[in-house]
Image (spheres, helix red, strand yellow):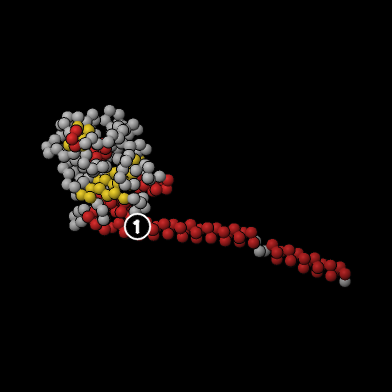
């Protein structure tokens, strides 16, 4: 009898062990973690996609079309001047610009590289104005006022983006200034939605810049060296205009002697 009881006890013990082993809590916990993580990833991706979709929808009214040729007219604070293109100076000449930063008028025969370029140092305005003529948007900022996260926000809007360029601009009278050909908007906040509206409305807008299809690619040494660009120089006063070393912002019929490196301006 004792032997039978012992056998039954052993069987019960084994059954209990099997029962305990039949619930793999570790595996269940792992699966739950994976499911929760996957759900979080999916939720994040969905949220980011919705944010991007909502952002694009908000910018839709600022997309140029035949019916809406200059959407920047809807943006508060944009200054507009009708500049004619094709007025060029040589690299040793300056332009007595009437606006700071300039956003049109006479400019250097060589454009500044402007395909998502963020220049760490101030660049000669005459070259950057030529980039505007090609359809680029130039984001200038006061390096004494825009730093840290604000600077990073601006960089993210430029790096890797075609026909977009950014540079510090000494003594700028506002923290941020946006330029496209014949258009300017000055702002104080890098998070201002008007930055994206301005870029959407005017970058490569075939209705607002003179030289549709012209390049923003780097030219190279001897023309415009992206890695060693000509440095910024303050614009001379209008009283210094002499027709040779200093030229006017607007010169009807004028054309500088610098050759066009690609055949298009």
Image quadrant assignment for residue 87: top left
The crowd level at tag 1 (other Cα within 10 Å; few <14, some 14-19, many 20+) is few
| Point 20% across, 56% down: residue | 68
Which residue sits furthest bottom?
Answer: 1
* Residue beneath the point at 22% across and 50% down: 79
Image quadrant assignment for residue 254: top left
Residue 196: x %, y % from top left = 31, 52
Residue at position x 17%, y 33% from top?
A: 241
- Using the rendered image of the protein, determine whether residue 222 is visible from the camera's viewpoint: yes
Quadrant position of residue 247:
top left
Residue underneath mark 1: 55
Compared to 237, does 201 lie above or below? Answer: below
Question: Which residue is at 15% across, 31% downward?
Answer: 243
- Residue lying at the far right in this picture: please name it: 2
Name the spot of residue 242 as percent of width and height, x first. Answer: 16, 31
Q: Nearer the viewer, residue 157 or 1?
A: 157
> Is residue 206 among what the camera can see?
no
């Amino acid at each position: 009898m004792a032997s039978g009881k012992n056998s039954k006890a052993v069987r019960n013990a084994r059954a209990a062990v099997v029962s305990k082993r039949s619930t793999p809590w570790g595996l269940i916990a792992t699966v739950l973690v994976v499911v929760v993580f996957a759900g979080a990833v999916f939720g994040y991706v969905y949220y980011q996609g919705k944010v991007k979709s909502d952002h694009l929808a908000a910018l839709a009214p600022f997309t140029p079309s035949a019916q809406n040729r200059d959407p920047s007219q809807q943006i508060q604070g944009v200054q507009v001047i009708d500049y004619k293109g094709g007025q060029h100076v040589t690299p040793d000449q300056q332009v007595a610009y009437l606006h700071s930063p300039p956003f049109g008028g006479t400019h250097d025969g060589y454009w500044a590289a402007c395909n998502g370029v963020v220049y760490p140092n101030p660049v000669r305005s005459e070259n950057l104005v030529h980039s505007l003529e090609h359809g680029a948007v130039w984001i200038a900022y006061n390096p004494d006022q825009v730093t840290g996260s604000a600077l990073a926000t601006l960089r993210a809007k430029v790096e890797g983006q075609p026909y977009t360029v950014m540079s510090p601009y000494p003594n700028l009278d506002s923290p941020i200034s946006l330029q496209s050909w014949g258009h300017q908007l000055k702002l104080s906040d890098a998070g201002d939605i008007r930055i994206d509206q301005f870029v959407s409305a005017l970058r490569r807008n075939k209705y607002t810049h003179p030289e549709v299809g012209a390049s923003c690619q780097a030219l190279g040494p001897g023309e415009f060296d992206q890695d060693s660009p000509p440095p910024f120089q303050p614009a001379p006063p209008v009283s210094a205009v002499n027709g040779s070393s200093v030229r006017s912002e607007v010169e009807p019929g004028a054309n500088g002697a610098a050759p066009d490196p690609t055949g298009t301006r």
